[in-house]
Image: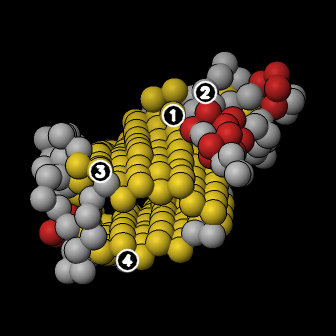
Amino acid sequence: MLNISKFLSVPVLTGLMMAGGAQTMAAPAVSTPEVMIDLNGVNLVRVGGSNTRVSFTADPAVPAGVTVVDHGGKNCTMNAEIERRGDALLITFVQQQRGFSFGFVTRCDPRVSINLAPGTNLDVNLEKVVAEFSGAYGVLQMKTADAVISFDGQANAVDISGHQLAATLILNNTEGTDHLRVNARKLVIDLGVAEGARLAYQVNAPVSLFNRGVTEAADGMTLQIASDVLKGSTYFAASAR
């Protein structure tokens, strides 16, 4: 039998994401470690640009803003460029590197934190990313090639697509979530929900080791998974509510 765990472990996926080194940008580096943002009238926040490790929160007690927690190396600079377009706010990560671009010598591994208002619609488009989400969101969309994703919160709907994904999700208030859709060629996913939550499964995976620890209910939240190679589970999480 095919042993898929070695292809889909979090360390392997993380290694794939961090390989390849940094990109050299032509523009001069200007450090902006913390930028406050105005979400008044904003319906959607879009995030793109250079690959990074990023944590998203939706904490009403903290001002909305973007913070560069760590530039990722002594020769690296990560900036957040922010632009308003109508009711959408665009946040673009711009990574800059001084000196020679030998990834194995001067690899940049930046970390960024973004705090948004609860209920914000969020669209993340980063090719390679380690992403953490906490708090309550509107519609969460994410497009990526390789990603390690951690989610602990709630959303009206979640759509994630990529090539190789490892996702650990604790989803609160599934009654208020229309669907969770994940589409990836190789996928490790573990979904924890509150005791009594109901799930309607739509799983399409030719090669699969998937444990349905939450009994199917036709009227439950739609869990739609499409993958060539799938490993994972659903379960009742003590911390979910």
Q: CA distance from mark 2 to mark 3?
A: 36 Å
- Mark 2 crowd level (few <14, some 14–19, many ≥20, 10 Å Cα): many
User: 161 or 76, which is in the foreground?
Assistant: 161
Judging by the rendered image, the residue that carries numbered circle 3 is 235
Inspect the image, locate mark 2, and give the three-letter code of the amino acid beneath it.
Gly
Please tell me which residue is depicted at 18% across the width and 47% down the height of the picture: 240
Sequence-first disc among 3 and 4? 4
Judging by the rendered image, the residue that carries numbered circle 1 is 111
Q: Residue furthest top?
A: 74
Please tell me which residue is depicted at 24% across the width and 80% down the height of the picture: 218
Q: Is residue 15 visible?
A: yes
Q: Which mark is residue 72?
A: 2
Residue 229 quadrant: bottom right
Inspect the image, locate mark 4, and give the three-letter code of the amino acid beneath it.
Gly
- Mark 3 crowd level (few <14, some 14–19, many ≥20, 10 Å Cα): some
Please tell me which residue is depicted at 58% across the width and 33% down the height of the picture: 110
Sequence-first disc among 2 and 3? 2
Secondary element at tag 2: loop
Q: Which mark is residue 182?
A: none
- Mark 4 crowd level (few <14, some 14–19, many ≥20, 10 Å Cα): few
Horizontal side, residue 216 vs residue 47: left or right: left
Secondary element at tag 3: strand
Residue 55 quadrant: top left
Q: Which mark is residue 86?
A: 4
- Figure colour scheme: secondary structure
Q: CA distance from mark 2 to mark 1?
A: 7 Å
User: 20 or 106, which is in the foreground?
Assistant: 20
